[in-house]
Amino acid sequence: MSSTPIPYGRQWIDEEDVAAVVAALRSDWLTTGPRVAEFEQAFARFTGSAEAVAVSSGTAALHGIMYAAGIGAGDEVIVPAMTFAASANCVVYQGGKPVFADVKPDTLLLDPDSVISKITARTRAIVAVDYAGHPCDYDALRQIATDRNLLLVADACHSLGGSYKGRPVGSLAAMSAFSLHPVKPITTGEGGMITTDDPELARRLRTFRNHGITTDHRQREQQGSWFYEMTELGYNYRLTDLQCALGLSQLVKLPAWVERRQAIAARYSAAFSGLDGISSLTTHPQVSHACHLYVVRLDKQILGMNRSTAFAQLREQGILVNVHYVPVYLHPFYRRQFGTRQGQCPVVEEAYEQVLSLPVFPHMSDSEASRVIDAVKLLVEVSVQ
Ligand SMILES: *Cc1c(COP(=O)(O)O)cnc(C)c1O
């Protein structure tokens, strides 16, 4: 038996990617050059959006969104508790308060009823997180946002390449955030993107990523001008030309990669469907699931072992499973700063005790997928006996 460890996610870099980055290195522009706009345009086209704004990380994308949305002190933003901390941290960066909502037990996606129950006079926006790559119920969430005059934002860091009712992820909310970290659907090392159809929001985002300065270095060079003005407080959240060269090269491969992820997920689902004590999440028929994560829930009673034991046993066999996520409001920072506590989102807390993310990534081989399936089956068989 081969025991080479199988990571839960991994980038795929080929010789075309290497050549694209080398060409950028040999060009005149290492940052804020022509490849930034090229990558933004390709990304906008791919996601069916009018505009895409490249930034240095998914976190910077979320921060930019909260800035462009005008979130500030006293404002509340509804965020699912089952997500990476950055989905909520971005609200805090702007002085706002994240209000944690619960999720649906079958998909672990934001529950529209929980969202409604969290709305107050101070609520300004909703962050929909496409957990594991499954697009949220955007029609239901958009209806709530429209009725209550709230901004609907997507944290689409898992779901690039997915779609909802035939509409691509990136075109489903007022602004959508993407991460280009190596475990995400495509990578630029570190990186992020925001998509929107609103040119005014895009303009604010471009200013924000460049210190709040209204022109960039290349624009001034072209105009033969040195003068610039800082009109807002921004950051250096720029993405380099080297990274955009890699992103452009990666993006063309994404549709095939999503298909490969979906094929691996389908094998897992078929293999686990008859097993007691382990259940897969539901995929709704109206979506194309980007399959960033393959999450199973373990039933402690039936298996006679808790998630930590299963986690350790699989990792011992080189199946490098992971857990997504610790409920955000249970992190010490949130307890201290916002007084959050155990019991706020019961569905999220129950799921957190049970979830395990199995390896899935585009260049995973069939035999690696078989190793994962066999290891999970062994876990179930041994424990049920
Ligand atoms: C990865 C991720 C982020 C943050 O992206 P970075 O590029 O790592 O900053 C935000 N939200 C979710 C749901 C993520 O998975």
Image (spheres, grey):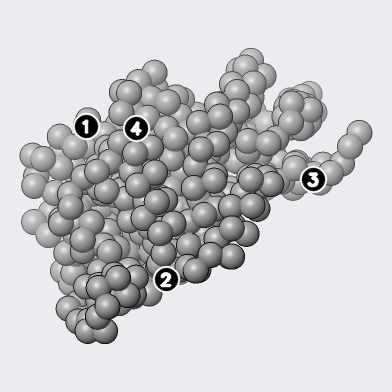
Provide the residue designation for mark 2. 333
Q: Secondary structure at mark 3?
A: loop
- Badge 3 density bin: few <14, some 14–19, many ≥20, Cα 10 Å: few
- Badge 2 density bin: few <14, some 14–19, many ≥20, Cα 10 Å: few
Q: Quadrant of residue 68?
A: bottom left
Q: Secondary structure at mark 1?
A: helix
- Gap between marks 3 and 2 measured at Cα: 33 Å
In front of the other: 255 or 101: 255
Q: Earlier in the sequence, mark 3 or mark 2?
A: 3
- Badge 1 density bin: few <14, some 14–19, many ≥20, Cα 10 Å: few
Seen at 38% across and 74% down, the residue is 236
Provide the residue designation for mark 4. 168
User: Is residue 334 shown to the viewer in this render?
Assistant: no
Q: Is residue 197 above or below residue 210?
A: above
- Gap between marks 3 and 4 measured at Cα: 34 Å
Q: Is residue 107 left or right of residue 175?
A: right
